[in-house]
Image (spheres, rainbow, N blue to C red):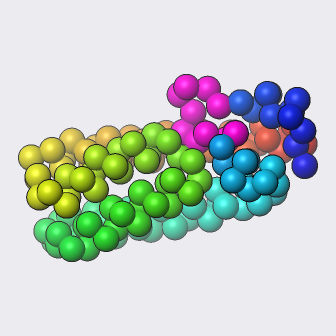
Amino acid sequence: MISNGQLLSVATAPDDAVDYDDLLARCMDNQDLAQRILARFEQTFGEDLNRFCDAVEAQDADQMAYLAHRLKGASANVSATKLLGVLNELESSVRSIRPDNLTALMEQLQNAWTHFKLDAPLKRQEMAAAD
C-alpha cells in the first residue's frame, strides 16, 4: 500500500489525465485495486468509444445518448477529469440535439482519450515504483 508521503510523489499535476489522489481515495488507498480499475477502464472505454463513433455515423441519437452517459460515468468512476469534462459537454450536446458542435466535441474527446492513454500508464508505473 502507498503511504501519504509516497502519494506526494505521484500527486496529480494540472495536466494529468487522471486525478490519482481522488482515484486512490475511492479505492481506499488500495493501489493494486486502483491499477486494476484503470486497466479495465482503458479496455472498456476504447470499445465504448468505437461504439459511440458508430452511433454518430449512423445518426442514432438514442445510442449516442446512452453511450455518452456510459462513457461519462466510467470516466467519473476512475477520476479521468479531462475525459469527464469533454463527455459532460458531449452528453449535453447529444441530449439537446445540437449537432453543430458534435464534430468539435468528438475531436476534443479523441484528444482527451489519446492523452489518457499516454499519461495513465506512466502514472501507474510511478505509483508502482513508489510502493
Q: Quadrant of residue 65?
A: bottom left
* Residue 50 visible to an observer of this rendering: no
| Image position of 121 (left or right of 65) | right
Q: Which residues are magenta?
A: 12-21
Q: Main secondary structure of the magenta part?
A: loop
Q: Quadrant of the C terminus?
A: top right
The x, y position of residue 86, in whole percent, is 35, 44
Q: Quadrant of residue 30?
A: bottom right
Is residue 13 on the magenta stretch? Answer: yes
The x, y position of residue 126, in whole percent, is 78, 37
Residue at x-position 32% and y-position 41%: 108
Q: Quadrant of residue 21?
A: top right
Is residue 80 on the magenta stretch? Answer: no
Q: How many marks?
A: 0
* Residue 110 visible to an observer of this rendering: yes
| Image position of 16 (left or right of 109) | right
Is 14 above or below relative to 108? above
Residue at x-position 39% and y-position 42%: 85
Residue at x-position 11% and y-position 53%: 99
| Image position of 91 (left or right of 12) | left
The x, y position of residue 62, in whole percent, is 21, 74
Is 126 above or below relative to 32? above
Is 47 above or below relative to 105? below
